[in-house]
Amino acid sequence: MEKKEKNLKNKTNFIAEQTGAFLSNNIAEATNEAVSGMNLLRSESIRMAKVLTDKKQGNLFEIIERAKFNVDAASKGVDVRAVTTAELGDPHAAADILIKKGGRAVREVQAKSSSKASDALHEMNQEKYHGMQKLFNSDKVDKAKELAKKRADSGSIYSKEYQDTYKNATGELKHGKAHSGGTTHNEAMKAAKDTKGYARNFELDQFKKEIGITTVNAAIAGGVIGGSISIISNCYKLNKGQIDSGEFLGNVTKDTTKAAATSGAVGALGSGMRIAAKKAGSISLSKTNVATAIASSVIESGVTIYKYIKGEIDEYETISTLGDTGVSTMSSIYTGAVAGAFFGPVGALVGSVAGFLIGSNVYQSCIAMFKNSELRIAEYRRLIQMYDESIEIMKSQREKMESYFRKRLSKNQANFDSFFSNFELSLTNNDHILFIKNMNDLAVFLGKELKYTNFEDFDAAMNSDDPLIL
């Protein structure tokens, strides 16, 4: 019965943690947009390193608004995104920004950032910008609209364009429910003067939001799911006469609170790991469900080790729990998330990676306890023993992984040789059909699928304004 309750608890925790991760997908995608936008801001600033600040800030203004808009759209689950025409390779296009839904542009935007509203209005007042959303600094837009209205009513030869500017002027990039919130001229200037500092603060603000929201979502999911399971379990005990009504209420309250706290901690750690992985460029670990699963294993392992060090559980239960944690974590996230079809069946690899995960979890937990726990001599001895064993586990599992990779690469060598032989043959004979077949065969072998599988899709992509992505 105790083992069944333990298994139920583990499954409940896992479901709650993954539910919290699912609920946090939008805020995680918003963070991805923040990182993407600030990476673009940094690269543009480097490109314009020798350009005067007042000129440079105008280019950065477009990117800042793009980033803010995309963060807001992603956090709301709205399927539109802003993209600058410069990043699409067309810096001289009439529009500075395109708002796109899928591959289709649904709004063109002209952006002007200036210390004077009249200067921005003068630059904006051109026929080629007619009908576009006209984006001003948030602190200049009201004055720009006031001037545009006066000049539109003056009867000048440019009154038509001034009327268009008055109609379409905005202090923030917006479309439907998504909006940027606006950017002042001073903010654009600060970004131009200290781009690294601006980008860092922009990302940090978003990181804090993601961690906070993910923690709350995970805690709520843990409380709801953990509490529901506790009610069912304790109802059974109450009906069997194993507990009274007072114990029932106490057990449910305790289980709900504990489940919420545990899931919240996992959510916070998982979110932090996901952000770090995104910044480092790790595709698999930057997914909310993967990072959450690993965070859960780290916390669960730490709790288990602490109980063992304190003498609350014996070696057998410690080994059993750590093994269950490591293997279940890897088996739940590995397929399709970390290993590709290139390595074929991954059963053996999952086992060695799970072993390495167990060793690293033990190592991390030991280090944390060395630093933060006040232990007795006997407890320190157990801790040192586990520390030494964790290092040996990581060494042995790494050797197994390396051996596995070498074997798989060796087996695949024949396939690579055949591919390149056929590839060279197609080039020598100018055989386009064989060339395409070889490329497709390689893609399939690597577990990928080419984006354009027929001429019609390829032709449509070539005729669109979007970048060509294979």
Image (cartoon, helix red, strand yellow):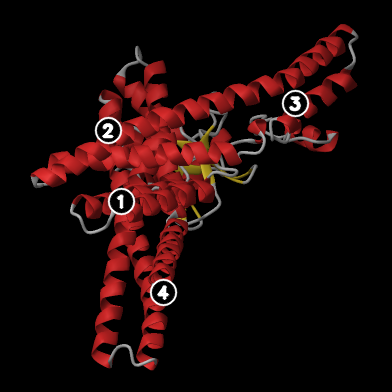
Residue 396 left/right relative to 138: right
Q: Secondary structure at mark 4?
A: loop
Q: Which residue is mark 2?
A: 388
Do labels 4 and 2 touch, CB within 8 Å? no
Which label sits in the foreground, 1 or 4?
1
Quadrant of the image containing the C terminus = top right
Dot placed on the residue nearer the N-terminal end, 2 or 3: 2
Crowd tier of the residue under label 3, counting other residues whose Cα lies within 10 Å: few below 14, some 14–19, many 20 or above: some
Q: Position of residue 375 (x, y in %)?
A: 10, 47
Residue type at numbered disc 3: Leu
Instruction: Determine if residue 70 is in view.
Output: yes
Dot placed on the residue nearer the N-terminal end, 4 or 2: 4
Which label sits in the foreground, 2 or 3?
2
> Could you say which disc has been placed on residue 315 in the image?
1
Q: Nearer the viewer, residue 227 or 370?
A: 370
Residue type at numbered disc 2: Asp
Residue 110 left/right relative to 212: right
Identified at 24% across, 38% down, the residue is: 385
Q: Nearer the viewer, residue 24 or 92?
A: 24
Residue 373 left/right relative to 265: left
Q: Which residue is mark 3?
A: 442
Residue 93 left/right relative to 153: right
Crowd tier of the residue under label 2, counting other residues whose Cα lies within 10 Å: few below 14, some 14–19, many 20 or above: few
